[in-house]
Image (cartoon, rainbow, N blue to C red):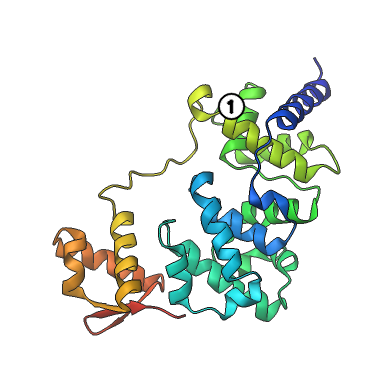
């Protein structure tokens, strides 16, 4: 079977599966670049079921990127509580400020200059352009990587460059939005990691007892109290002073927190 025939067969199989099994997700009912940017950031390392409620509530509170840009950092982190990886919220807020000021709210234009935007990488920037404008671009996430490796019987050590080249050959022109949604569902509901045995390139570390868990507790504590002295945060780290100092130092460096003497508050910038 020629490569082109393999690709055609692959396209038909994935699209036929999608037609019968497509998931109804709120971000698939819009082409608003801001709403799609929000969904992409929320979906990073987070289960779809957990994201839906946060996504809908967020858009009711901040329906445009300009409204988000005007929000306070405390409000933003408070709305994010429970989703984890709080840097995503901080970066999204900063990105909203940049897009509102420099690009006059033009999210799609800003995605073409994603390197200027904190927390936005090539995958997210491309995904927003695909789902908002149906641009003939490709992007390869964990799901799509697994699908390509399985369907084309590739070595798991294949380079990203080779995978993206294959993804470009497989793209049905003019159907980028539908195609990528189909691939997402094909990988999430049929060709799962468990079923294929294909492991992601990077695996999420255990949350329980991790620094990530302590960071989340610190944010929750400071959001609730507006400020917290070092000693009151100690129990969140099981009274491990060196560990807490290291975590807080990193959070200050990341501009999530600001240190005033022995008091910690959320950073506004």
**Residue sticking out furthest to the bottom:** 261
Q: Nearer the viewer, residue 66 or 135?
A: 66
Q: Nearer the viewer, residue 51 or 150?
A: 51
- Residue position for label 1: 191
Is 5 placed left or right of 202 in the picture? right
**Residue sticking out furthest to the top:** 1
Helix, strand or loop at label 1? It is loop
Residue 143's quadrant in the figure?
top right
Give the position of the N terminus as an image quadrant: top right
Q: Is residue 75 above or below residue 158?
A: below
| Residue visible at 65% across and 64% down in the picture | 114
Q: Nearer the viewer, residue 176 or 38?
A: 38
Residue 189's quadrant in the figure?
top right
Is 252 placed left or right of 100 in the picture? left
| Res 249 visible | yes
x and y, in percent, of residue 16 in the image: 76, 27
| Residue visible at 60% across and 54% down in the picture | 40
x and y, in percent, of residue 184 in the image: 64, 38
Q: Is residue 66 above or below residue 80?
A: below
| Residue visible at 55% across and 51% down in the picture | 52
């Amino acid at each position: 079977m020629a490569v082109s025939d393999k690709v055609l067969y692959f396209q038909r199989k994935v699209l036929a599966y999608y037609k019968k099994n497509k998931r109804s997700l709120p971000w698939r009912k819009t082409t608003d670049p801001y709403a799609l940017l929000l969904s992409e950031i929320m979906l990073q390392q987070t289960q779809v079921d957990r994201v839906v409620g946060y996504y809908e509530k967020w858009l009711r509170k901040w329906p445009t990127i300009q409204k988000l840009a005007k929000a306070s950092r405390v409000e933003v982190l408070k709305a994010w509580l429970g989703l984890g990886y709080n840097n995503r919220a901080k970066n999204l807020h900063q990105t909203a400020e940049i897009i509102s000021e420099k690009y006059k709210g033009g999210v799609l234009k800003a995605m073409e200059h994603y390197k200027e935007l904190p927390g936005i990488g090539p995958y997210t920037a491309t995904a927003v352009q695909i789902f908002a404008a149906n641009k003939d671009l490709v992007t390869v996430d964990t799901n799509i990587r697994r699908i390509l490796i399985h369907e084309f019987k590739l070595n798991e050590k294949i380079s990203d460059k080779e995978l993206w080249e294959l993804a470009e050959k497989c793209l049905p022109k003019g159907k980028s939005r539908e195609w990528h949604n189909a691939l997402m569902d094909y990988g999430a509901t049929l060709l799962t990691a468990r079923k294929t045995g294909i492991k992601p390139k990077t695996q999420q570390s255990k949350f329980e007892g991790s620094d990530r868990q302590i960071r989340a507790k610190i944010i929750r504590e400071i959001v609730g109290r507006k400020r917290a002295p070092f000693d009151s945060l100690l129990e969140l780290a099981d009274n491990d002073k060196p560990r807490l100092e290291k975590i807080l130092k990193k959070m200050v460096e990341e501009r999530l927190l600001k240190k005033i003497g022995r008091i910690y508050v959320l950073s506004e910038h």
